[in-house]
Image: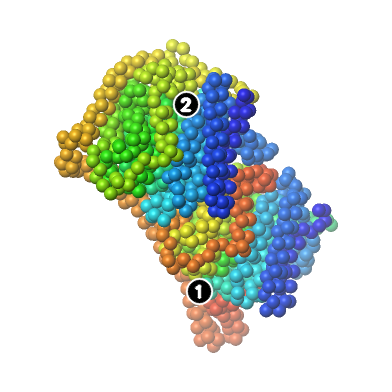
Amino acid sequence: MEGFPILSLITFIPIIGMIIVLLLPGRSEKEIKYTALIATALQLILAIILLANFNYSAGGIFDKSSFQFVENYKWIEVFGGSWVGTIKINYFVGVDGISTPLILLSTIVTFIATISSWTINKSIKGYFALFLLLDTAMIGVFISLNFFLFYIFWELMLLPMYFLIGIWGGPRKEYAAIKFFIYTLTGSVFMLLVMIGLYFSATQTLADGSQVFTFNLLALMDPSNYTATGILSPLNPHNLRFLAYIFLFIGFAIKIPMFPFHTWLPDAHVEAPTPISVILAGVLLKMGTYGIIRVSFPIFPEITRELAWYIALFGVINMIYGALVALAQKDFKKLIAYSSISHMGYVLLGMASLTVTGMNGAVFQMFNHGTITAMLFLSVGVVYERAHTRGINDFGGLASQMPIYTGFVTVAFFAAIGLPSLSGFISEILVFLGAFSVASIRVLTIISTLTVVLGAAYMLWTLQRIFFGKLNEKWSSLHDLTGREYAMFIPLLIIVFYLGIYPNPMIHLMNTSVNSLIEFMSANAQHITALAGF
Amino acid sequence: MTDTLIINFSIIMLLLPAFGFGILIVFGKKYPKLHWLEIGILSIGLILAIVVLITKLTTYLHDDIAFNFVWINFSNISLLDSFKIRLGVKIDNITAIMLFVVNLISFLVHVYSLEYMKGDPRFNRYYAFLGVFTFSMIGIVISDNLLMIYIFWELVGLSSYLLIGFWYEKKSASDAGKKAFLTNRIGDIGMLVGILILFTTYNTFSFDSIFHQISLGKLPFDSTAWLTVTGILIFLGAVGKSAQFPLHVWLPDAMEGPTPVSALIHSATMVAAGVYLSLRIFVMLTADAMLVVAIVGAVTSFLAATIALTQNDIKRVLAYSTVSQLGYMIMSVGIGAYAFAFFHLVTHAFFKSNLFLGSGSVIHSMHHEQDMRQMGGLRKKMPVTYAAFIVSSLAISGIPLTSGFLSKDGILAGSLAFGHLTGHWLMPTLGFLVALMTAFYMFRLIIMTFHGKPRNIEKYEHAHETPFVMTMPLVVLSLLSIFFWYTLNPVAPEDGWFLHDWVKTPAQVTPIETRFDFMVNKPAQETSVIAEGTHGTAEVSSITNSEEYEHALHWAHIPSLILSLTLGGLGILLAYLIYQWKYIDPDKMADKLRPLYLFSLNKWYIDEFYHATFIGGTIGLSKLLSLFDKYVVDGLVNGTAFFARLTANISEIFDRYIVDGMVNGTAFMSGLFGLSLRKLQTGKVQTYIVFVVFSILILLLLFKPF
């Protein structure tokens, strides 16, 4: 695999697809759809090849040499005037055990979302072009090791998402789209500030001995690269690292979404078409937590340690608040949206534990939530397409009419509840084990176990209201799953069962990186605190 | 027969029903006869269970057989010291006996259902669910560690949800399934936190390893109080599964499921799991924890018996009698009568499944009539069912020559000894009162159902004895409710092989100062021998009870025997007086004791109380938070947006009328500002992109290095 630009290929294949789609005439709908399908399928195959060639003992995180499939090219080099100096930005990408699961997740979910997009019938050309652009942006975020590149992909994702909700969405699509856009853009502004601050605080020595400012994430993680006076440099006694951490965290927290920044999510989900909801919940939300793990934690380990309790607190609020609000929902899709908020809380709690077990649980939970919630939103889509309503109380007795669909939904629901033998259980128990082992967040962890009951309550109640009871005559014409719908559910179902029964491969994949992240953070937190002691 | 073979047999026994489940779920619709696969699987399971039972109780009577493997491997991680999560199987005597009980009853239920569920449109799915139920229960039984128990524990919850709510068209059925799952999950939270405490302390889930470390003096958070708390937390799981007060409310509703399922749930699976777990953690329970367990058991037993007195639904009476008998078992664990708790679990499993299958037989022949006030006189029509009912009712009432007499009398004698030794007289008092009530309500049931004149002639005319596949299980289970399977001496169970050879109370591992005095053998403290087997650590334990306790038991034996026989006889006599010979009119009595009668009939209003408080409270809170989310959290967001728009409009006005009239250059700048803010509402995203680019440039300038 040496020298083969597999990451760039995975990232930019959809762009090629997009160009083809744009070149095709708008009425050749079939060709457009198949182009998208082939592009995402190729991506998925490449992701599997990536996994097959992955070195499980390489840690990554902070160490360039143990990142894999690295591509590092000169990209932007401009002289920004005498006071900015030369701006050098590299196209620097690579993966480790934390990004690889997410790349796998993105490619799987995108592929299934493409299948689910088959029923889109409004300006297909535009839809698939934007869809593929979105795809590139998502993968780009997960492979970037340069903050500037990361930011570009992060922003690039906004645009197609905005239009996909705003044009192909439901009745209140404009409101939902602009809300999503402004909310995430606000987050981006926070992130941008920190990025620029970091840029001017750390330097990297080039081969010729000259020192330049850097966006290189790995360089930013090393305290010895910081200048004495940089405003985010630990060496500067008046540094603004604490404030910067909060800003960056808010930037990521909006995406997770973390309470109280979560209200864009239910609106966006309710209005978005099914495949976009699937991508939104399945992949986009993970970008927030991924950003925290990739950027915030290793660059600001000392502040992370200081604020870990608060991160855990917000995690627990997400878990319980999300579950309680979900319980009161009458719209099927909104309920699932709130369940996402609840489940993302586990990720926050797990990472806040700063233990190998908890962090493994958090990354695993990202993956599992991605697959499980994709099934949940697909389930909503199936019934909405047939009945044109999502009101939970409008249904009843669908189990008699659509038994196979009911079976799949039941599995998805129980996976979300965290039933053992399904993948969600493993990540939840790892989060609990990790978080409970840390004395300071033990009480929070005990409180968080309430979700175990609340989650089951809203899920089973929904199951009962939609599927059980006597069949409402109105729905006696609904037909069960089609072949295409089988194709969406079955791969996810297999993953959920496989990782629930035998989670070892995934643990194996994440473990080395998680371990080196935790080790790196604890060493650096002490180091930086010592530096600041000057 | 080697130990590997026993392990292999147990694992095959475990996996076969799961395999059957998979096949039936996928292909069941296409091949209607496929349920025979599940019956075949259970027959194999039963044979394997018998082989394991016999081998274990002969060749390996004193040796436990264990096997485990790495499930999740965190490989060589510097921070975790090569942390691995293991799953494993451990076969000791109670495991082997339970395996037999579970497989036998499950097999009989499978056979019985052939007739009972005949014609059900989801016949194969029913068998698939029975398979997953059996699978989950076997998983709990053979597990050697807490995590694996928790995993199968949840799967039992799932199975009960699927089977109780099997007839999902009925709202009451789907309600009951949901209630069972959720109530169980409340207990599971306690169990989960208990597991977390144990794992954090001992870095393992394995029972043997945890107990070994406790015996070496390592305690959770270095405190005996926390050991007590941990024990109670794990016991909470059992409170849920074994339907103990205050989480008992799901079990009576669980009879909404098909009757054979009730037989399974109420005897060998599900409710047995809670008692089984309590037995598993028995050795780590401190005196305080045991007292809590004993009180919960005694109160549950009493509460359920008082409710059973007035119920008119045949299955409901049986359901409350189950809760009551489970209370006995749990109390028995709490008072240190470990062996009797397990003994009663086994005997009860046989006679209770017999009662439920018998009631199923009645219901089947009465065309799904469950109200005893519509029955009567069925004795002649259904002689086999009647005989089965008589045998098992005598057993549950603790009449000599039955198995129930042996185990129940042991518990009652134990409670008397416990009261004598510790001064806690609550347990024997409630225990004996329950014995009286049990005999009464069971014979009330028999008389109302089988004796006297038929009250509903039309239904009576249709009634008939059920076919062989339904009566055969009744005969088998009736036979197993007779004493000679357990001991040759019908009044002294201690001399029989069951208690003398097979099941013994293991030694406590808790620090001596936290045990009951009578559980400390003062003259010569017998230490437990730790034997390193080839397949892990097996603990060979000796009887822990002191001579003092043996004396007390001996002292309690005769009084308890006389008292329980008197009370049992009295209960039966009362039932005959009121319902058979009608010397006392039950309606008049109910009128006289109206408040008490209503209290019992309405199940102490516990469901109503939960609805008004916990359920209502949660739903209310969720509605409140949902409004908070909509109007406060989102309101703030929309408010900010509104404010931004307002600012944009004001700056536009400002711009148009004031700034514009002034310097042109400034006007241009503000105009840009106002215009861009106004654009916020028009949704021109492109503007934003331009702004992002601009901001980067501006910020780059602002942050210039010094």
Q: Is residue B69 above or below residue B703?
A: above
Q: Which mark is residue A171?
A: 1
The lab-note entry on whether marks 2 and 1 share a chain reads: no
Look at 74% across and 58% down and name the residue there: A46
Look at 72% across and 76% down and name the residue there: A24
Residue B512 pos. (x, y %): 45, 21
Q: Which image quarter: residue A217? A: bottom right
Q: Chain of mark 2?
A: B
Residue located beneath label 2 in the image = B283
Q: Which image quarter: residue B408? A: top left
Look at 22% across and 29% down and name the residue there: B573
Q: CA distance from mark 2 to mark 1?
A: 63 Å
Q: Is residue B302 above or below residue B532?
A: below
Residue B466 pos. (x, y %): 39, 41
Q: Residues within 10 Å of mark 2 (few under 14, many from 20)?
A: many
Residue A61 as seen in the image, left or right of residue B627: right
Q: Which image quarter: residue B79? A: top right
Residue A304 as seen in the image, left or right of residue B291: right
